[in-house]
Image (cartoon, coloured by chain):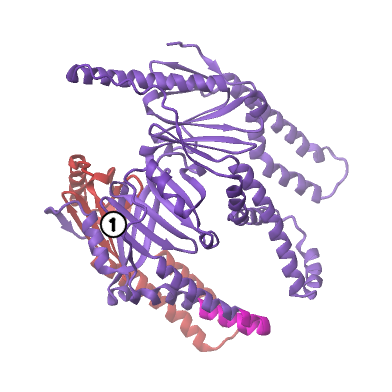
C-alpha cells in the first residue's frame, strides 16, 4: 500500500515534469501505466496469492508455518522453545473481526496474520497450554 | 553476615565525570566549531553565551559525577546483593545471589594506579535493558575479592542445603571436593600470535568506517566549494596520486589497528574453572570476563581467506544474556589459533562437541546458484563503468571472474552435518564460518525454497539461536532438498497428531 502510494507519487511527479518540459507522449503513457500495474500487483494480486499460500499447523510438540509467494518459507518452532504467545488487533483488523498471533521464542518472533478473533484467541490459549506441557527431553 | 554498607572508591567520581564528558564531546565540538566559523562579530555579550553554557554544563557534569559516587552504596543482606543509588529518584536494586551468573572485571588506565577494578554483574535477565544488571564503577581489589567470597559462601550455603537433603537419603557420602579447584589454563596467546592477529585483523575496516563517520559529522562545516577547486587540480595529477594517497591512509589506519589490537589482546588467556570459562586480556585496560558454560549457545569457527591460507582460525562463542550493544556477547574464545590445534582445548571445554563431523556438501547442480544472481546486478554496473570511463573502466571486467570464483568457493564451503544432537553448518560469505549448535539451543528452523531451487530440488536453511539479548542466525544456501528433509525430520520432535491446521482469513 505505502509502496504503491510512493510509486504513484513518483509517477505523478515524472508526468508533470514531462508535461512541463513538453516531452514525448509515450513517457506520459508509461507514467500512467506503470503505477496502475504496480498497484494492481502489489495491492491486489500478490497479497491475494500470499494469502492463498499461507499455512499454519499446530501440533502437540511443534508449530509449522509455511508462507511466501516466490520463495516458499517453511518454519518449524518446537513447543519447548515457545516463550509466549500474543494476539494483536489494530483498528482495521478489528473492523473485520480479525486478529494476528505472534509466537515468541527466546530469540525469534513468528506472526500469523489475520485470523478470525475467536479462532485466534482459542489458538493462543491452546499454544500456551501446549507450551506449558511440552517438556525438554533433549 | 555483615550488613555493612560499602561505597565505591572516590576515583569513580572522576570516572563518572569523564564518562559524562565523553557523551558531550560531539555536541561541544560542533557548537564551538560552528561558532568559530561564523567569525568574531563584535564584542556583544551574546558571543559569550556558548562559553557560559559550556561552563555550566561542565560543572553540572562534574557535580553529577560526584553525587553519583556519594549516593552509591552496596551491601550484602539475606543472600542478596543490594544496591542503592540516585539523588532525586532513588533506585534500589536487590539481586538474589544465586541469580548472579557472572562477574566481569575491567581495569582501566585510571584504575591501575590505585589497584582498583570495575565490576560488572550479569544475570540472565540483563538482556532487556541497555546496561548490565549492576555496575560498580571502581572498587578496590580487596573489595572485589570480598564480593567473590561472599558469592561463593552464599552459593555454598545453597549447595549445603541440597547436600544435606541428599545426605539424608544416601547416608554418609559427603561432597567436600568443592574447595576451590584451581582453574586449568586452556589457552594462552603467544606474542607472535597476537602480532599475526593484529596484522591480519579486520580492524582496518572499523577504523576506516570510524573515519568516515567522523568526516560525515563534519561534512556541513567543511567548505566544499573551496576544496572542490583544489580537488580538480589534484585530480589532474591523475589516478596515480589518488591511489598513492588512498594507500597511505590505509597504511596509517592499518598501523593504528595493529597497535590497538595488540593492546587489547595482550596476554590473552582462557582458564577453565568449574563450569565457567574465564577470559583475561589487555595491557592498558585489563579485562576479565566470566562465561558460565551453561550459557553457551553455539560455537562458531571463522576463517578469513588470508588466515585460512596459513591454517589459522578464530573460535567464537555465542552466549545468551549480556546486554544490548555489549561486544562481549560474541566472545572470541580463541582469537587466533592454528586450526589443527583447536580440537583438544575445545573438547576439554565442551565434551559433547564433535568438530570433525561427516559433512554433506551442496550438490554439484547447485553451483550456478552461487554466482548467477550476482551477474544480474553486475552486468549493468560493469557495462556502465566500461562505457563511461572507457579506457580504465575496462578493468572492471575483472570483477566477473572474481565473483564467479568466489561463488564456486562459497559452493565448495557450503555443507551441513548431523551428529547425535548436534547440527553443524558451514558457509562462506567471504570468510568461511562453521557453526556447531546443539538441537536444544535452536530456537527455530526455517527452510526456504524459490521456484528455481524447486526445479533443481534444492533448498536453503536458516536456524536461529539466542545470542546476547537477541538472536543470531546461521544459514546454508542451496543444499539438496533430500538432505534438508532429513534435517527437518531430525529437528522435528517425534511425530504426533496435528491439533490445529489452518490458514489466515
Residue B23: x %, y % from top left: 63, 39
Query: On the rendered structure, is B191 left or right of B100?
Result: right
Residue B386 located within the stretch drawn in magenta: yes
Subunit that carries the residue with mark 1: B
Query: On the rendered structure, is B332 left or right of B227?
Result: left
Q: Which residues are magenta?
A: B378-395
Residue A45 located within the stretch drawn in magenta: no
Label the red chain with its letter: A
Q: Residue at x 64, y 21 (%)?
A: B10
Q: Residue at x 37, y 28 (%)?
A: B99
Residue A120: x %, y % from top left: 21, 50
**Viewport quadrant of the C terminus of chain A:** top left
Q: Residue at x 17, y 47 (%)?
A: A122
Q: Which residue is mark 1?
A: B418
Judging from the image, what secondary structure is the residue with disc 1 in?
strand
Quadrant assignment, res B474: bottom left
Q: Is B177 situated above or below B336? A: above
Residue B116: x %, y % from top left: 60, 25
Label the purple chain with its letter: B
Neighbour tally class for label 1: few under 14, some 14-19, many 20 plus, Cα within 10 Å: many
Residue B93: x %, y % from top left: 45, 24
Q: Main secondary structure of the magenta part?
A: helix
Q: Residue at x 52, y 23 (%)?
A: B144
Q: Is residue A60 visible?
A: yes
Q: Is B305 situated above or below A109? A: below
Q: Is A2 situated above or below B375? A: above
| B138 or B255: nearer the viewer | B255
**Viewport quadrant of the N terminus of chain A:** bottom left
Amino acid at each position: 500500500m505505502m509502496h504503491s502510494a510512493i510509486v504513484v507519487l513518483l509517477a505523478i511527479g515524472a508526468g508533470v515534469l514531462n508535461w512541463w518540459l513538453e516531452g514525448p507522449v509515450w513517457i506520459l503513457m508509461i507514467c500512467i501505466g506503470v503505477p496502475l500495474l504496480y498497484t494492481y500487483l502489489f495491492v491486489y494480486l500478490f497479497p491475494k496469492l500470499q494469502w492463498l499460500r499461507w499455512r499454519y499447523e499446530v501440533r502437540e510438540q511443534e508449530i509449522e508455518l509455511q508462507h511466501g509467494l516466490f520463495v516458499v518459507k517453511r518454519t518449524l518452532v518446537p513447543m519447548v522453545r515457545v516463550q509466549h504467545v500474543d494476539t494483536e488487533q489494530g483498528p482495521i483488523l478489528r473492523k473485520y473481526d480479525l486478529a494476528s498471533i505472534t509466537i515468541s521464542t527466546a530469540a525469534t518472533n513468528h506472526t500469523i496474520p489475520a485470523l478470525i478473533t475467536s479462532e485466534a484467541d482459542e489458538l493462543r490459549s491452546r499454544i500456551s497450554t501446549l507450551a506449558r506441557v511440552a517438556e525438554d527431553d533433549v | 553476615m555483615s550488613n555493612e554498607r560499602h561505597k565505591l572508591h572516590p576515583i569513580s567520581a572522576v570516572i563518572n565525570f569523564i564518562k559524562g564528558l565523553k557523551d558531550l564531546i560531539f555536541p561541544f565540538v560542533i557548537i564551538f566549531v560552528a561558532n568559530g566559523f561564523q567569525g568574531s562579530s563584535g564584542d556583544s555579550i551574546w558571543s559569550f553565551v556558548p562559553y557560559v553554557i559550556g561552563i555550566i554544563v561542565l560543572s553540572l557534569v562534574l557535580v553529577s559525577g560526584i553525587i553519583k559516587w556519594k549516593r552509591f552504596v552496596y551491601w550484602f543482606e539475606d543472600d542478596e546483593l543490594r544496591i542503592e543509588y540516585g539523588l532525586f529518584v532513588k533506585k534500589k536494586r536487590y539481586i538474589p545471589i544465586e541469580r548472579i551468573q557472572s562477574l566481569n572485571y575491567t581495569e582501566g588506565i585510571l584504575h591501575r594506579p590505585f589497584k582498583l577494578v570495575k565490576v560488572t554483574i550479569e544475570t540472565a535477565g540483563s538482556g532487556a535493558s541497555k546496561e548490565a544488571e549492576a555496575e560498580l564503577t571502581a572498587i578496590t581489589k580487596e573489595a572485589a575479592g570480598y564480593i567473590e567470597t561472599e558469592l561463593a559462601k552464599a552459593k555454598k550455603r545453597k549447595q549445603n542445603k541440597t547436600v544435606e537433603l541428599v545426605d539424608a537419603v544416601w547416608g554418609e557420602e559427603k561432597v567436600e571436593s568443592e574447595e576451590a579447584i584451581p582453574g586449568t589454563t586452556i589457552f594462552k596467546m603467544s606474542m607472535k600470535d597476537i602480532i599475526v592477529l593484529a596484522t591480519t585483523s579486520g580492524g582496518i575496516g572499523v577504523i576506516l568506517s570510524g573515519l568516515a563517520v567522523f568526516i560525515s559529522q563534519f561534512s556541513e562545516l567543511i567548505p566544499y566549494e573551496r576544496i572542490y577547486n583544489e580537488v580538480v587540480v589534484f585530480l589532474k595529477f591523475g589516478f596515480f596520486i589518488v591511489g598513492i594517497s588512498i594507500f597511505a591512509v590505509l597504511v596509517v589506519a592499518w598501523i593504528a589497528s595493529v597497535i590497538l589490537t595488540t593492546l587489547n589482546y595482550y596476554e590473552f588467556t582462557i582458564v577453565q574453572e568449574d563450569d565457567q570459562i574465564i577470559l583475561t586480556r589487555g595491557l592498558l585496560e585489563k579485562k576479565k570476563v566470566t562465561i558460565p558454560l551453561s550459557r553457551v549457545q553455539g560455537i562458531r569457527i571463522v576463517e578469513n581467506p588470508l588466515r585460512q591460507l596459513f591454517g589459522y582460525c578464530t573460535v567464537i562463542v555465542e552466549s545468551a544474556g549480556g546486554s544490548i550493544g555489549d561486544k562481549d556477547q560474541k566472545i572470541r574464545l580463541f582469537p587466533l589459533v592454528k586450526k589443527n590445534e583447536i580440537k583438544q582445548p575445545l573438547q576439554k571445554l565442551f565434551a559433547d562437541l564433535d568438530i570433525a563431523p561427516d559433512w554433506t556438501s551442496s550438490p554439484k547442480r547447485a553451483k550456478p546458484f552461487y554466482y548467477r544472481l550476482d551477474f544480474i546486478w553486475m552486468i549493468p554496473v560493469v557495462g556502465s563503468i566500461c562505457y563511461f570511463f572507457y579506457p580504465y573502466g575496462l578493468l572492471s571486467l575483472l570483477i566477473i571472474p572474481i565473483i564467479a570464483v568466489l561463488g564456486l568457493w562459497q559452493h565448495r564451503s557450503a555443507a551441513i552435518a548431523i551428529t547425535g544432537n548436534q547440527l553443524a553448518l558451514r558457509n562462506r560469505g567471504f570468510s568461511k564460518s562453521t557453526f556447531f549448535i546443539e538441537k536444544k539451543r535452536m530456537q527455530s528452523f526455517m527452510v526456504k525454497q524459490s521456484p528455481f531451487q524447486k526445479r533443481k530440488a534444492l533448498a536453503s536453511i536458516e536456524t536461529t539461536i539466542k545470542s546476547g539479548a537477541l538472536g543470531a542466525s546461521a544459514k546454508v544456501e542451496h543444499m539438496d532438498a533430500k538432505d534438508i528433509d532429513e534435517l527437518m525430520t531430525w529437528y522435528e520432535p517425534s511425530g504426533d497428531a496435528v491439533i490445529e491446521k489452518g490458514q489466515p482469513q
